[in-house]
Amino acid sequence: MSKKKKKYYTVWKGHKTGVFETWNDCKAQITNFEGAQYKSFESFDAAKEASKGNYFNYIGKKTDFKSELSSIQLKKIGQPNYNSISVDAASSGNPGIMEYRGVDTKTKKQLFIQGPFPEGTNNIGEFLALVHGLALLKKNNSDRILYTDSKTAMSWVKKKSCNTKLERNEKNKILFELVDRAVNWLKSNTYKTVIVKWETKAWGEIPADFGRK
């Protein structure tokens, strides 16, 4: 069994900021801190350098992607529709600290972000991100499409139900209040927005990705 590679964690906003050498130390700084900003790095030097900069300059930054699909497959899939927004979620554990956001697909300009929540799952985050995106596009009377890399979230939105197995408790009370609001929105609103699956194998990580994989 290969040894798990050590990671370092930069916290830009938290109870304490700086570089931390373990996930538990990082987690202590972001738990119950509204609007916490953090990211993992492969080396201490990279984490230290990032701590001098801006959080939004580092999340979702992966430029070394090269598709393993054939040229025929890539041609069939085509390019992303940039008249769109993309949504994604990140969860440190399942359940774990979770947050979600939406960005302009082309520019990666952040349009909304929620969290981190102390106890959530990636599926819940993906679902909430989709509904948030739908509500935003409807409010702005926008004809843009909506990208997600989660088939589960697409299914939940279609069924107008959040089919999570996560049990409700005091720790995730605020999160489930958002879930209830999202379900109610789906049941009481119609929308023309087309939800499309992001082709990760062809295009790399979705632009809203937090870059913590």
Image (cartoon, grey):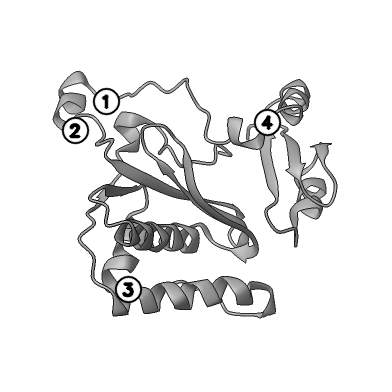
Mark in the foreground, 4 or 3: 3
Amino acid type for the residue under numbered disc 4: Phe
119 left or right, relative to 52: left
Q: Earlier in the sequence, mark 4 or mark 1?
A: 4
Q: Which residue is at the front of the view, 5 or 135?
A: 135
Which label belongs to residue 186?
3
- Measured in 3D between alpha carbons, the distance from the residue under mark 2 to the one under mark 1, in whole angstroms, is 10 Å
Query: Which residue has dot 4 on it?
Result: 41
Let me know if residue 145 appears in the view.
yes
For numbered disc 4, what is the local secondary structure? strand
Q: Helix or strand or loop: what does disc 1 sit on? A: loop
Question: Residue sitting at 15 percent across and 22 percent down?
Answer: 72
Disc 2 designates what residue?
Answer: 77
Q: What's the CA distance linking mark 2 and mark 3? A: 30 Å
Q: Check the picture and name the quadrant holding the C terminus.
A: top right
- Between the residue at mark 4 and the residue at mark 3, the CA separation in whole angstroms equals 38 Å
Q: Circle 3 — which element?
A: helix
Q: Nearer the viewer, mark 2 or mark 1?
A: 2
